[in-house]
Amino acid sequence: MVQTVSTNAGRGATDRTALVLGATGGVGGAIAARLICEGWQVRALCRNTEAATSGWRHNCPTPQFIAGDAMDVASVIRAATLGEGVAAIVHAVNPPGYRNWSSLVLPMIDNTLSAARATGGARIVLPGTVYNYDPARTTVIDENSPQNARTTKGKIRVALERKLADAAPEVPSLIVRAGDFFGPGTRASWFTQAMVQPGQPVRKFTSLALGVPHAYAYLPDLAATFAGLMAIPEQLRAFETVQFAGHWDATGTQMRDAVRRTVGSDVPERAFPWWMMRLAAPFGGFPKEALEIEPVWKHPMHFDNHRLVDLLGVEPHTPLDQAIAAALSDMGCLARR
């Protein structure tokens, strides 16, 4: 039997109130901005409210920034239960640069679960990852795909999602899984940190895996998807997981070609130096952590969005060239006209 939950998730909260953890990051900020644009009351936990307010780049009012840390359970509970509480908690926090996952990821979701319980059952909303799956054995991902992670990060994410599943229906949750982020507002992604150099005209395109198909998520489309699903809590299962198909680069060359069309030049393509990551990996740090996800780029994994379409009718989708142009403009890679 499939369980659904009442629309009145949080104790006394209106349906359109949310706490966003990670609103100063790319995906968290995009979700917060989209919710605000659609009339939600949004509060956001951050360490420095002044810096968060001055750094807000979205074309909408700022959320209500509340000082605190996602690693401090009291801070998260306080932010979630202020006033009448919230109906949803967006958990969009991750350790930066893939560092300290083992010590931070699971304690942070435990804090969010505690806050959701304190509200009386606010729905936890989570951006999902592909790390939960073995790329060599998973070609299509849907809500029934076995989570057969082989990496440390993947096993941690599997454990995180298991915590959410075990908490339902007392604490309902929604997981939207997507490919690699790109687009306006993206802070840290392979597109902005490896494929294209920000802050200058595009002189080259760096491919993570030449000719290998890959899934990408245009951040404004993904944020619209989150907002659309959060607006229909009565239609969601107690533990709901959906896949966001996004832009499927079926040839492994479509992103490169879109960049070339946008800048009007056949900029050269270079291969990402995975060999350098291998040399540096024994010393730890980013190379070691990045190398762990190399198989995600070497093996195609496609997202089956049938459940998402069942719920929304259609997946928000911006044409690739338009999305790439917006991304490059936001990165400062296009001449102003």
Image (cartoon, rainbow, N blue to C red):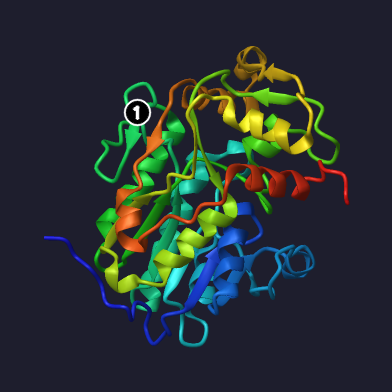
Total labels: the figure holds: 1
Outermost residue toward the left? 1
Tell me which residue sits at (35%, 55%) in the image: 308
Residue marked by disc 1: 139
In terms of image quadrants, where is residue 7? Answer: bottom left
Q: Which residue lies at the image location 52% right of the left edge and 47% below the top edge?
A: 104
Q: Amino acid at mark 1?
A: Thr
Name the residue at 25% across, 72% down: 5
Q: Is residue 14 visible?
A: yes
Q: In front: 289, or 255?
A: 255
Q: Quadrant of residue 331?
A: top right
Q: Nearer the viewer, residue 184 or 3?
A: 184
| Residue 246, horizontal then vertical, whole percent | 48, 45
Which residue is painted at 28% across and 46% down in the image? Answer: 143
Horizontal and vertical percent for residue 103? Answer: 50, 43
- SS state under label 1: loop
Crowding at dot 1, Cα within 10 Å, few <14 / some 14-19 / many 20+, comes out as some
Examine the rendering and report whether any part of residue 164 can be seen. no
Q: Quadrant of the N terminus?
A: bottom left
Above-or-below relation of 190 to 112: above
User: Percent from the top left, x then y, of residue 71?
Assistant: 54, 57
- Given residues 250 and 100, the one toward you in this image is 250
Horizontal placement of 180 versus 245: left or right? right
